[in-house]
Image (cartoon, helix red, strand yellow):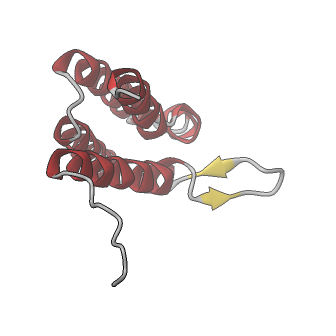
């Protein structure tokens, strides 16, 4: 008989799955493409080049990421900070040229993933 490794209980599994989704989407949105010189950009900055619709689409994905942090158990106080990051990214990103450069540099989704990790790492026993 083969000894099976115990599966984590449902809440731990839900947190791990949400955490993976947040990191996967944050990387896709903010650092998926490597440029010469090692600088990384994501599709957030690229779709943000489309006036209005691009910024709205990017904000939608960012708010989905925040919803996943709620699923992982991140409290409202931390999620409010995440919302502020997305609002700042969306508002400044809506300005032509400067906003597009800001979109490539600010990386709100990676910031929010780090906020989630900081909270979960602090609150997880062991």
Q: Is residue 74 above or below residue 107?
A: above
Q: Foreground: 72 or 96?
A: 72
Provide residue 94's location: percent of width, then percent of height.
38, 36
Provide residue 7's location: percent of width, then percent of height.
27, 60
Q: Is residue 54 above or below residue 5?
A: above
Q: Foreground: 90 or 9?
A: 9
Q: Is residue 46 left or right of residue 86?
A: right
Q: Foreground: 33 or 22?
A: 22
Q: Residue at x 69, y 58 (%)?
A: 34
Q: Is residue 8 above or below residue 3?
A: above
Provide residue 50's location: percent of width, then percent of height.
39, 54
Find the residue positioned furthest to the bottom: 1
Q: Is residue 80 visible?
A: yes
Q: Which image quarter is the C terminus in?
A: top left
Asked which quadrant contains residue 92, the reply is top left
Q: Is residue 79 above or below residue 103?
A: above
Provide residue 89's location: percent of width, then percent of height.
40, 31
Find the residue positioned furthest to the top: 77
Q: Residue at x 17, y 45 (%)?
A: 11
Q: Residue at x 19, y 51 (%)?
A: 9
Q: Is residue 49 visible?
A: no
Q: Foreground: 112 or 16?
A: 16
Find the residue positioned furthest to the right: 37
Q: Residue at x 33, y 84 (%)?
A: 1
Count numbered badges in the picture: 0
């Amino acid at each position: 008989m083969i000894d099976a490794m115990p599966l984590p209980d449902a809440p731990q599994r839900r947190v791990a799955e949400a955490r993976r989704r947040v990191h996967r989407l944050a990387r896709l949105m903010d650092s998926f493409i490597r440029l010469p010189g090692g600088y990384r950009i994501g599709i957030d900055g690229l779709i943000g080049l489309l006036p209005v619709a691009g910024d709205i689409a990017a904000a939608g994905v960012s708010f989905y990421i925040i919803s996943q942090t709620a699923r992982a158990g991140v409290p409202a106080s931390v999620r409010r900070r995440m919302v502020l990051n997305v609002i700042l990214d969306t508002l400044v990103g809506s300005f032509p040229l400067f906003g597009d450069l800001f979109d490539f540099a600010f990386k709100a989704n990676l910031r929010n993933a780090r906020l989630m990790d900081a909270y979960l790492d602090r609150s997880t026993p062991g």
